[in-house]
Amino acid sequence: MNTQRGFTLLEVLVALAIIAYALAALIRVTGTGAANASYLRDKTFAQWVAENRLAEMRTRDDYWPAPGGGGGDVEMAGREWFWTTRVINTPEPEMRRIDVEVRLDDDEEISPISILTGFVVRPQRGDAAGNTPGSTSGGNASGE
């Protein structure tokens, strides 16, 4: 009578196959997580580039953009980012729409990583005291 205890070769091979399959799935999940983290990092920086560009356009004195487009590049986080802007008329004549698209490549055929839309209102010119049309000059809230 054979009383040896242990695993047969077939049992060991089946166990190794199961472990190999599980490790392959784990590596695939880890790789996907790393790719997602990289994509989200790029998406965040691209959004910041778009927000900065829109803020630069909005904060210029007496800025009223002509309809059309333009583009440029900027460095952020050690990478070069390419942005394009498109200024569009709106039904409201005193307002313009600005679309900012950001890419990692200057090829506009490639889908942008980030698209940001903002609006600007035509600046109103004031008098020497800084009053704009329709405002009252001097005094406090009660008119004194």
Image (tube, rainbow, N blue to C red):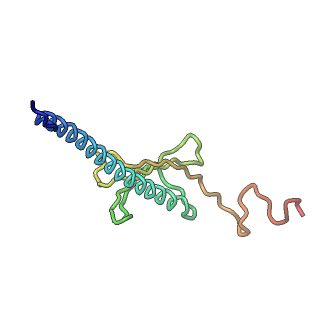
Which residue of the protein is positioned furthest toward the top in this rendering?
A: 1
Q: Residue 35 appears at what percent x and percent y?
A: 31, 49
In this picture, residue 131 sits left or right of residue 96 = right
- Residue 2 lies in quadrant: top left
In this picture, residue 28 sits left or right of residue 62 = left
User: Is residue 59 or residue 22 the one in the foreground?
Assistant: 22
At 76% from the left edge and 57% from the top edge, which residue is drawn? 135
Q: Residue 136 appears at what percent x and percent y?
A: 80, 59
Q: Residue 20 appears at what percent x and percent y?
A: 20, 41
Against 34, is 6 above or below?
A: above
User: Is residue 127 or residue 74 the one in the foreground?
Assistant: 74
In this picture, residue 44 sits left or right of residue 122 = left
Which residue of the protein is positioned furthest toward the front in this rendering?
A: 1
- Residue 123 lies in quadrant: bottom right
In this picture, residue 3 sits left or right of residue 49 = left
At 22% from the left edge and 42% from the top edge, which residue is drawn? 24
- Residue 127 lies in quadrant: bottom right
Q: Quick one: quadrant of the C terminus? A: bottom right
At 52% from the left edge and 59% from the top edge, which residue is drawn? 55
